Image (cartoon, rainbow, N blue to C red):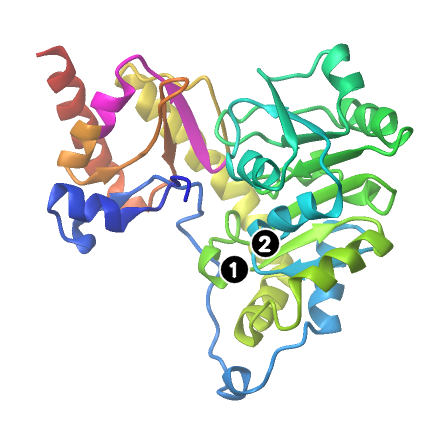
Amino acid sequence: MLEHGGNLQQAAQQYGRPLADWLDISTGINPQHYPIPALEPSLFQRLPPVTESLHAAARAYYGCQHVLACAGSQAALQVLPTLRPPCRVAMPRTMYQEHAHAWQRTGHEIQFFEQTPDNHILQQSDVLLVCNPNNPTGHLYATDTLLDWHAQLAARGGWLVVDEAFMDTTPQHSLASHTGQAGLWVLRSLGKFFGLAGLRVGFLLGEPTALAQVESRLGPWSVTGPSQYIASLALADHAWQLHMRAELPAQSAQLSQLLSQHGLTPTGGTDLFQYVPHPQSLRLHQVLAKYGVWTRYFAAPAALRFGLLSTQDWDRLNDALTLAIKSLSD
């Protein structure tokens, strides 16, 4: 199992601090989650075939024609490598590592690049995979660039796979409306922007025949009835979405400012997290943990990711950063 943010149980055991006594900012999950409605008991009692209402809500929200619901985008990214015989796959070195893990374990050859593939890599690859915006660096690829890459790959039967887990606050940069063409896949998630990671609801956008192949591999009942019901409400709630698209960028800017005040100026990020390379990132991560603040540590390159936090937690983070920076200089 690869390491991820949100592994608070590990932190509690390692540092001997009760779960309830942590400020967990190790993920990019919106701390102001979509409100959970009252649920009818029947939602828990019936087998849950994916309803047309959920797919209709997703098509309207993403602005696409073809979509497949799955148990989080994680489920879809694990299936995609099984649709191709072993081939050459290119992706950024610093990125959500479950993608590389899924392709490698199914026999594909991975070639990494730093941020943007050069022409040689592009011409030698059968599949190009990027996160847009990138997790954890926040790098955003231009739509025209991605479409050009897709055209080159598709002309020889290749794929472009774009993970848009952190795209919801900037839908104008999404490739969702371009899906339906052969060789173009887009992954979306309700876990980040909507703050509903526990629902395990994601969507795969693509060409309908290829989506049917994925659906057959996922099998029946891949998304629970309660999850479908809540996801349909969230995708259709335009007022809540507009509010969050104004609120989250302001909070992320506030987080960037706070980190910079402590000499931890981010080099990138999104509206849901900030990315801070630092030569002493491991030590900083450990010291913050001693004060009950859990961050996401990256070893190569050495960096920390700081997620957003609730209003009542800003003073706690400020105090912990003050003590941690002082500890580094002692």
Residue 313 versus residue 201 in the image, above or below: above
Q: Which residues are magenta?
A: 271-285
| Mark found first going from the N terminus, 2 or 1 | 2
Q: Tag 2: Cα neighbours inside 10 Å, few (<14), some, or many (≥20)?
A: some
Q: Nearer the viewer, mark 2 or mark 1?
A: 2
Residue 326 versus residue 195 in the image, above or below: above
* Amino acid at pointer 1: Arg
* Residue at position x 45%, y 17% in the image: 267
Q: Which residue is mark 1?
A: 200
Viewer-side residue, 9 vs 42: 9
Residue 133 versus residue 166 in the image, above or below: above
* Residue at position x 37%, y 41% in the image: 5
Asked if disc 2 and disc 1 are in contact, CB closer than 8 Å, the reply is: yes
Place of residue 121 in the rendered image (x, y in percent of width and height, measured from the top left): 72, 16
Place of residue 184 in the rendered image (x, y in percent of width and height, measured from the top left): 79, 39
Quarter of the rendering containing residue 65: bottom right
* Residue at position x 81%, y 44% in the image: 177
